[in-house]
Amino acid sequence: MYTTIRLKKGREASLLSRHPWLYSGALEAVPEEVAHGDLVRLISSDDRVMAVGTYSSRSMIAVRILDFRDAQIDHAWLTDFIGRAHRRRLLMGIGDDPETTGYRVVFGESDSLPGLVVDRYADILVVQFSTLGMERLRQEVISALVDLFHPASIYEKSELPSRIEEGLPPAAGPCYGDAPDLVEFRENGRRHLADLRNGQKTGFYLDQRDLRQEIHRLAAGRRTLDLFSYTGSCGLAALAGGALSVHCVDSSAAALDIGLQQACLGGLDRSCLTCETADVFQWLASRTSPEYDLVMVDPPALIKSRRHADAGRRGYHFLNRAALRLLNDGGILVTSSCSSFFTEEDLAITLRRASEQVGVELIILKIIRPGPDHPMSLYFPEGSYLKSFVCLVRH
């Protein structure tokens, strides 16, 4: 059984409220035999078993909770909890629809599996291990996934900054079966490609499914600009929805090339799609005239920690102000932030100030968050990160 760590008196509150992180300040002296990455049992000052989790000596988050009971974390436990996560997706209507075969199966703390992400692209699974504690459970996780899903292959894409903080090197490659570099899957009937080898995240931005569906609904008859387009999934959703034209701008020529492949895969009119490799900030700095009816702005996280807050806020302001200048009267701005340090309120304030400077009125049509396969836990508000505002522009 696992080494026991005692909590300081009166420091049980976060565990009683089922928060999955316990900070180092809540612990009494950690026994010498406890090593970084070990599974540990937490007990209260009066000897009640509070939880089992993985210990980190390299983080302020000392223990990431796996179970709020005295549990044995083994193949059976992992199979049970991963299976529970997938059954929740089925209850949400995700996982058994042949028209949507790409979705998130496990979302870390929100599924009581901190340090683990599992995404599904048709019959291929992609895994990410972000902590040493979960890394040590790798073989049991892979075995559980094989038993539950019988995939053609499982590919690892653990290329995360958090691994460096945990003392782990980046890791990528097949860990069960053979996987192609590009995997085809469906989303609301549209055909897409996930770039397993070189793509961002696990190969595709699955968390923006609902946003793409909204863009598809709004795009008919609109001249469209997709900034930070990556492989152009939002732009292609617009094109499939009847956009007059779509222009994608991204710094990665390789990503744009995959976008063109997806357009062909989906039978879309390539004559209405143009792609440009450029730095979006520089591209926007040289353009000020309204010429689009739909502009999408989806930068990478500009605020990755609190020390980046001021520079990031300036970046979000510049991008949204510049995008508004390119929109015709009656146009639509779709703007996103994936930074957990930049809240919905922060984005709303940025949009208000940008609209005042440009001299336009913004009317919020919808605020879109990640799809239900990226669940928000009542007990883990820190898991909230992605937000998108869809706004009507009036001159």
Image: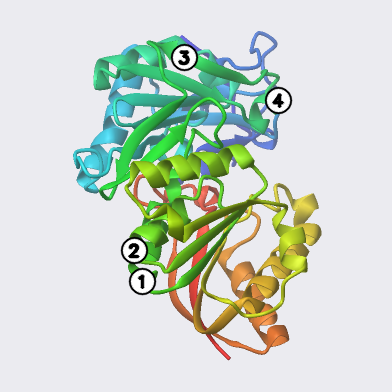
N-term mark: 2 or 4: 4
Q: Percent position (x, y) of residue 180?
A: 42, 20
Which residue lies under the disc numbered 2?
A: 241
> Would you place residue 395 above or below residue 371 in this image?
below
> Would you place residue 238 above or below residue 150 in this image?
below
Along the line of sight, the residue nearer the viewer: 314 or 39: 314
Q: For the residue marked with disc 4, what is the amino acid?
A: Ile
Q: For the residue marked with disc 3, what is the amino acid?
A: Pro
> Would you place residue 297 above or below residue 108 in this image?
below
Within 10 Å of disc 3 (Cα), the crowding (few <14, some 14-19, many 20+) is some
N-term mark: 1 or 3: 3
Q: For the residue marked with disc 1, what is the amino acid?
A: Ala
Mark yes or no: residue 74 visible.
no
Tell me the residue at 66%/18% (across/down). 168
Residue 158 shown left or right of residue 166 in the figure: left
Tell me the residue at 64%/21% (across/down). 170
